[in-house]
Amino acid sequence: MVATAIVGCNGYAGQETLDRVLGHPGLEIVALGSDSLAGSGASALDVRLNGSLPQFTTNGEALASGAELVFLCLDHTEAAAVEPPPGVVVVDLSGAHRLDDADVASEWYGVAPGQWSYGLPELFPPTPPRIANPGCYATAALLALAPLADAIDPASIVVDAKSGVSGAGRTPKPGSHAGFVLENFAPYAVGAHRHAPEIAQQLGFPVCFVPHLLPVRRGLLATCYVHSDDDLRSLLEAAYATSSVVRVLPAGVTPELQRVQNTDAAEIGVYADAATGTAIVICALDNLGKGAAGQAVQNANLALGLDETAGLRLQGVLV
């Protein structure tokens, strides 16, 4: 069993990561870090957690616990300040270590601690021991577009994406308040979202990206408009032919939030608008699953030489 610590366990990403580690046959929790819950039992996070788990410690204590695997579930400023213990596999779920250009990182995040290995397993397999977990929007956009990068006109690309409110994190904000979210639908951070430079970095060119907030708890759907003379469906099917996580749906089947919510899978649909010559590629995933905790565990599995899908939520047909 691989001794595992979660630093910043009290946020959504931390709790979702914990849930997957608890169901993982090769990982064992040895430390739960949370500065706000330090000294409390695990049930302080959720009453469903029993006494078999260690009580919460400070994040610093969790980091120094001797764990062989650490999940950093902190905000980017806190994650940037972390000095990982030597020889330990560390997966950072924040944006602190995603960007390779220090000037770009400083512009978008205000910190530039240096890039770690960017881990989107189906496209950019991670290199241990330091792994930067991709952002949720970036994951969806890249799954839809990266296999097509050499076959599409970069200037034509528009990524129109929508995410559930849990993407904003557990800390209350005016824009995630029920009075704003319910019975509402709005774009945000238009032309100014931190996942835009991440998408551009991995594709090799920028795209027009507009995120929107959906009045749902979880789930993300990215609709990508492109122009190409190639058979995009064949390219995508070839890219994900051996994947247990990403499904290219048959023609006529539409990606849906309901099928990917509470899972670590992603669905891709491919369409054509004959009137305008536009190809449409749609990716649906759970922003807390394949967009965060599920992908972090998938990256950890690869870094440790474990079964890539161990601990992931990929089975079942819930209504």
Image (cartoon, rainbow, N blue to C red):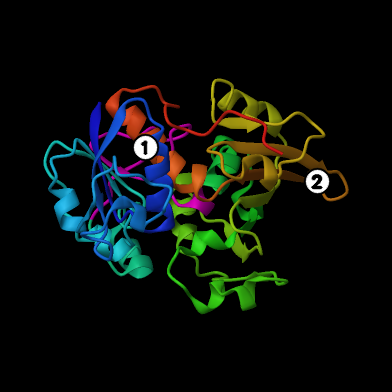
Quarter of the image that includes the N terminus: top left
Where residue 149 sits, quadrant-wise, is top right
Residue 265: x and y in percent read 56, 36
Name of the residue lying farthest toward the right:
275
Which of these two is toward me, 95 or 300? 300
Q: Residue at x 56, y 75 (%)?
A: 177
Where residue 293 sits in the image (x, y, percent)? Answer: 43, 45
Nearer to us of marks 1 and 2 is 1
Q: Residue at x 53, y 60 (%)?
A: 166
Q: Is residue 275 left or right of residue 139?
A: right
Q: Which mark is residue 277?
A: 2
Q: Main secondary structure of the magenta part?
A: loop
Q: Secondary structure at mark 1?
A: helix
Q: Amino acid at mark 1?
A: Val
Instruction: Give whichever of 80, 41 is nearer the camera.
Output: 41
- Left or right of residue 225: residue 108: left
Q: Is residue 135 left or right of residue 183?
A: left
Q: Which residue is mark 1?
A: 21
Residue 283 shows in this picture:
yes
Q: CA distance from mark 1 to mark 2?
A: 45 Å
- Label whose residue precedes the other's in the sequence (1 or 2): 1
Measured as percent of width and height from the top left, residue 29 is found at: 27, 39
Q: Is residue 112 visible?
A: no
Q: Residue at the location (38% across, 46% down)?
A: 49
Q: Secondary structure at mark 2?
A: loop
Which residue occupies 57% across, 27% down? 240
Q: Which residues are magenta?
A: 114-138
User: What kind of residue is marked 2?
Assistant: Gly
Q: Residues within 10 Å of mark 2 (few under 14, many from 20)?
A: few
**Magenta stretch encompasses residue 247:** no
